Image: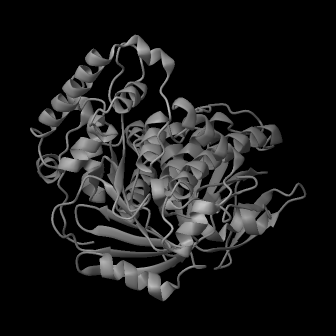
Amino acid sequence: MTAAPDALRKICIVGGGTAGWIAAAIMAHHFRGKLFEIELIESDDIGTIGVGESTIPPFMELIAKLDINEQEFIRATQASFKLGIEFQDWSRKGERYFHPFGVIGQQIELSDFYQCWLKAKLSGHDSNLMDFAPAAVMAREGRFMLPFKARNTPVGGAAYALHVDAKRVARYLRTHAEARGVRRTEGIVVDAQLDGRGFVERLALKDGRELTADFFIDCSGFRALLIGKALGVGYEDWSEWLLCDRAIAAQTQNVGPPRPYTLAQAQDAGWRWRIPLQHRTGNGHVFSSAFMSDDEATRILMDQAEGELVAGPMVVPFKTGVRDQIWHKNVLSLGLSAGFIEPLESTAIHLIYRGMDFFFRYLPDRNCDPHLAAEYNRRMIADYREIRDFIILHYCTTQRDDTPFWRACRDMQVPDSLQERIALFRGNGALREGLDELFRPVSWWSVLEGMGLRPGAYHPLVDRIDEPPLLRALDQARGQLAELVRTLPTHQDFIDAHCRAELSGQ
């Protein structure tokens, strides 16, 4: 095969973990060893954070694209299924809502379901929005079925993701990537030397070795060895809107069967997560150090966590934000080195493979045309900001005033981009949609309704539908969905029948 004179011949990934091995696996799949060499440098002496154990539905597309058998992957990572996220105590203490994956209802006479439901609610209909979301109803009943196996039924519009063991994911993808030609080098990068253009030319390892490549992918985590330390790219800090800056993580043994959803329960100065896998449960407490100490946050987490402690607790400090340039010169940053948004909506792994997807769209040669990098940065930073606004939405719409933290969240001045979305929605439920955004209308409807924001009117075209048949259609849809879900296997029974992991060893 003949390559262009300036074509990339070697890409070096600095750091393993989830970010590094996702990047390696994707490149190995796309290039199949025919375009250039891929080398990944990591050290067993440097631990990975490994607390992000919850994914979103696009992750299942990634698994399929890599030709990975889903059942095999679930067994190997001891995963469980995830139908969405339950939020407790966010709007007010004692209240809860659900953010489901997949659809909410179906169009009625060509009108959006949500608008039809709004009209029905203004007429006094007794339904809840989640009564029509198949993923939410399955989660509420603790039941599960692969939606594509039931396409023409009321649950066919659901979607799902996985709760995974992050370290096992990295281990699995390492095996997958190495079998397809990726070379792993054991070592610790201590310095990077630049050439006359300001490009990274070579890496110096702790043991004295030096490594060269044409292009580098920085997966070194919060240390950001290349994008931050070597190239000096700045960081856009979002802590004025997202007040949490620390997390305590711990793992416990399961108490009872795993639930098919993530729990995000608000606390006095943040929130805690519960992520149930087949073999254990991931627990965490995300909080603001301005309002709570590490010791108090740890005590709260351990008081609420169920089951015997397996690992932790571990303190993880972070700064929410994004690099001013995610790709600069011949360095692309991925994962924590590119930016960080607290894991409230499980977007961290998504941003890793999203970053690789855009990299392939703008794949450079050794000259790294800055116009390619500029367009990449524009698209990726837009993704980070979209997710940022969606996360802020969970905080700024709270009605809680019982602690200084929640009063600060309620009273904050939100970004203009989010303020405009909320103002547009308040009228008659209209939503601003950007280009290829992650969070679609179902997500916005779910959180806005869950936090108590309901439009004052519905879209006028819904009045094409007379009220009696509209109400009958809603009653019928709600009843059929509930009836079918009651016939499905429990989440645990489905796992036992199709993808139960061997639980020997951790």
Residue 223 figure quarter:
bottom right
Question: Dividing the image into 4 quarters, which one contains the C terminus?
Answer: bottom left
Question: Dividing the image into 4 quarters, which one contains the N terminus?
Answer: top right
Residue 427 spot, x, y in % from top left: 56, 33
Query: Looking at the image, which residue sits at the far bottom?
Result: 295
Q: Is residue 321 above or below residue 64?
A: below
* Left or right: 132 in relation to 214: left
Q: Residue at x 37, y 76 (%)?
A: 250
Near-viewer residue (425 or 84): 425
Query: Looking at the image, which residue sits at the far front?
Result: 123
Residue 462 figure quarter:
top left
Near-viewer residue (252 or 445): 445
Residue 435 spot, x, y in % from top left: 62, 31
Q: Residue at x 80, y 67 (%)?
A: 193
Look at the image and name its color scheme: one colour
Query: Looking at the image, which residue sits at the far right?
Result: 196
* Left or right: 277 in relation to 49: left
